[in-house]
Amino acid sequence: MSAIHLPSRQGNSRHSTTEPAWVRRSLIAIALLFIGAFLVVPLASVFAQAFAKGAGYYWQAITEPLAVASIKLTLLTAAVAVPLNCVFGVAAAWAIAKFEFRGKSLLLTAIDLPFSISPVISGLIYVLVFGGQGWLGLYRDADHPWFPWFQTWLNDHDIKIIYAVPGIILATIFVTFPFVARELIPLMQAQGRSEEEAARVLGASGWQTFWRVTLPNIKWGLLYGIILCNARAMGEFGAVSVVSGHIRGETNTIPLHVEVLYDGYDFAGAFAVASVLTFLALVTLAVKTWVEHKNAALNAATENS
Amino acid sequence: MSVEVRNLIKKFGNFTALDNVSLKVESGELVALLGPSGSGKTTLLRIIAGLEFPDNPEATVAYYGEDVTRVSASHRKAGFAFQHYALFRHMSVFENIAFGLRVRPAATRPSDAEIRQRVDKLLKLIQLEPLAKRFPSQLSGGQRQRVALARALAVEPKVLLLDEPFGALDAKVRKELRRWLRQLHDEIHITTLFVTHDQEEALEVADRVAILRDGRIEQIGTPEEIYDHPASPFVYDFLGNVNLFSGRVKDGGVVIGETEFELPGKTGEVNAAAVAFVRPHDIRITREPSGTKTFPARVIRSNAAGPVANLELARLDGGDSFTVQLSKELFQELQPKAGEQVYVELKNVRVFSDDYSI
């Protein structure tokens, strides 16, 4: 496809889709006003509030053991949930985009499930399944367990999922599951199967085809999905709140710790910890913008093909 | 025998793509699989490559006598060029061509120097040496197709399979490339099957042409054989423009209107309704009737643009319209105008049984 260069008309040329200046200016003004009032001002106030009692207090708020524990837990949760969802997402997208099978639309709907149900419900699901009164909890006290060794193992190791770290990680995985898959499915569908087929005919094994052909083609889309997934994994409140039990220093993630501080009228502390989360979000956003830029450049290159 | 397939059946849902197809291709032959869309030609090629598998257990695919029916595509050692090239978009031209060598297991993988040497040789063959570092998105369609061919040839395949190799190119590049393909084939003599829906391409390039229709091979033969002796009305129609005249078969001839024409290949049927097939360039036009061998017709339209002149005529008796191709000289001589009456003589008339309609 070759680009067609029309002679660009300089000067007072008006295109058919260009509105008068006053319309353009007022639309831009409305947009800026909205962004300012609803995004910039609150964001700035997070940092302003965080430093309300001075830098010393700020530093103390984010280095006290409970805050450090919550930061660690948030990073751990993201570190487990994101790679797992990366693998699940690629596998699901691969299956949906490249193969025909029964129940494909069902799988597609299932992937969207975490998007469509309230995070609180997501958390409750895990409480109902794994909680003390849930399936796993009752199983530990069951008179006739299906797998006695499993019951013994659960009791011996005193496995706790709800109100413990595993529950937080499970809930986070559930809530962030769609990000990678959703990002990759349209991309992989658009790319089709022929490059993989070409690789196969040329003698490449399944793994070689995946590493050398499939993965490089979805690299940027995957990275973008991972970033979105990571942002949500670190910021998730609802689902994690239900399964965590709010044990300070043990099962409090950053968002939960912020809530605890805020409820305790420690506004400066709450905002200080919140600013850490905000900072992490801003870093994520910066990386995302960079990836999008890269991605757009790459798409433009293939668009010309 | 370098490629032999037997009794292939392939269905996609309710659609039968291949209906018991058998085909033999001699070593070093260039065979075209020709047919309209949905005739099963691409499916046949993909089964030969190992990208699809036949539905029936008794079907076989053999390369040089070796049964490869259950062998996966990555172990068949076939070269395959896709209709839309399927070049690896994130690799340079060089790396695309080298791919088949680089993915070999360490024991059989050539050294980097050897790979470089072989890729350079192929780049020379496809005349794209200066573009080795380009990416597929920076190439024209014709260049991409040549890279795709070089990539397929790099692994020294036993057979070369090309799916509509020139389908996505414009007419001029297409003609150049198909001549280039024929030359290439004459140089390296690799057994080649290629799929096309363009009869001109098949007739020009191939040693033999297999015509497919509704998942069956309708006819297979050299281009001359199938063009001059089409086995069915379908083949007749598919290989070029053809006029149909309804008439009756009678005593080794065919009667159209009140005029009798000789039939070179006599049919046994006597006095039965029949449809006669005549190519537009096998029709002669005169200003005067010549005995009983001509019938009158009216000129509806004439168009002399291009290397030959095309006329559209209608029979005066019955009104069937048909097309005629005239050389420019004859057209100048006759100067037929719309509305004028002329006399028509048919040559090389073919008759197929009447219940066969196309």
Image (tube, helix red, strand yellow):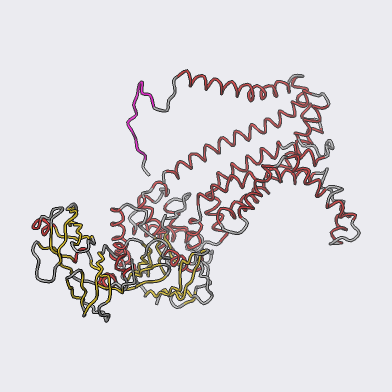
Is B324 drawn above or below residue A237 in the view shown?
below
Give the quadrant of residue A233. Answer: top right
Residue sitting nearer the eye, A289 or B7? B7
Is A46 magenta? The answer is no
Residue A258 x/y as whole percent: 77, 30
Side of A8 relative to A230 (left or right): left
Side of B291 relative to A94 (left or right): left
Could you tell me what secondary structure mostly forms the magenta stretch?
Answer: loop
The residue depicted at 68 percent of the width and 38 percent of the height is A232
Q: Residue furthest bottom?
A: B268
Q: Which residues are magenta?
A: A3-15
Residue sitting nearer the eye, B76 or B226? B226
The residue depicted at 35 percent of the width and 50 percent of the height is B130
Residue A45 x/y as whole percent: 69, 21
The residue depicted at 51 percent of the width and 60 percent of the height is B103
Is B132 drawn above or below residue B267 in the view shown?
above
Residue B51 x/y as whole percent: 49, 64
Residue A28 x/y as whole percent: 52, 22
Q: Residue furthest top?
A: A22
Q: Tell how many labels.
A: 0
Give the quarter of the figure containing the C terminus of chain B: bottom left
Give the quarter of the figure containing the N terminus of chain B: bottom left
Is B238 drawn above or below residue B265 in the view shown?
above
Is B132 drawn above or below residue A61 in the view shown?
below
